[in-house]
Image: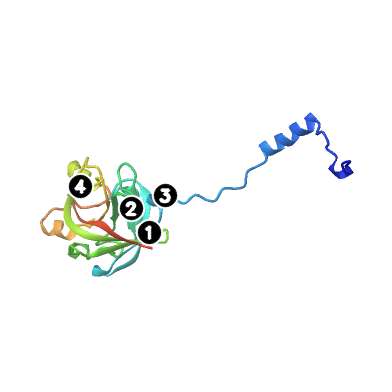
Amino acid sequence: MPLRPFLTPRTVPAALAGAALAVLLTAPAAPAAPAEPAAHVRAATLSIPAIGVSGLPVVPYPGSPDDAPGTRIQDQGVAASPYGPGGGVGPGDVGNYIVTGHRVAAGGPLRALPSLPPGASVFVTAGGVTYEYTITGTRTTSFRSQASMDAQRAAVPGSPGAAPTRAMITVTTCLTPEDDAAGNFWRDAQNNPEHRIDKIGVLTATEP
């Protein structure tokens, strides 16, 4: 049976075929979906029911605990979370998630942190996920000791050089009243006292 006219095979000229291929190769790709921000740069909120902290904003920044940028964040009455080589990881990540806030200045959002007992829950919400940490210990950091500061920001809190195997948190604030009462009025360039109290916890639940 003879082929119908609209089924008659046609030869595409080589130049036209090349042009079509060039169009296919150079046509702009569909825009990619926005990448999900890494956990350590996500803004978060902090809630510690045992001491009346609820929905405290936590602002991430590259740096180290209570450096100049971090202190400026805390001066706004919110908490700060340093990340990078001198800081920690993000919410829920394996390693040390560091949250620091004022106890006396800027409304003192962490004024009651020293009284937080072992077993208390700390909730961090970021990216639609709530991470529950359980407090397991307390340590004191001296800002006049590099070794002490290294221990505070270590991937395993208190153990510089140790490889982390689980998600942990360090919530830290100043011991200004205690230092002043002891006659220790030393201050660093950001007006931080020598000592800080660190409440350390481990991740125990995630929702959803």
- Between the residue at mark 1 and the residue at mark 4, the CA separation in whole angstroms equals 26 Å
Residue 7 is situated, as x and y percent measured from the top left of the image, at 84, 43
Who comes first in sequence, dot 4 or dot 3? 3
| Residue annotated with mark 4 | 143
Amino acid at pointer 2: Ser
Corner quadrant of residue 197: bottom left
In percent of width and height, residue 155 lies at 26, 46
**Label 2–label 1 contact, CB within 8 A:** yes
Q: Disc 3 to disc 1, how far (Cα)? A: 12 Å
| Callout in the foreground (4, 2) | 2
Q: How many residues crowd around disc 2 within 10 Å: few (fewer than 14), some, or many (20 or more)?
A: many
Q: CA distance from mark 4 to mark 2?
A: 17 Å
SS class of the residue under badge 1? Answer: strand
Q: Nearer the viewer, mark 4 or mark 3?
A: 3
Q: Give, as a three-letter code, the residue at label 4.
A: Phe
The residue pinned by badge 2 equals: 81
For the N terminus, the image quarter is top right
Disc 3: which residue: 38
Closer to the chain start, of discs 2 and 1, is 1
Look at the picture and state if 6 lies above or below 58.
above
How far is mark 2 from mark 1, CA to CA?
A: 9 Å
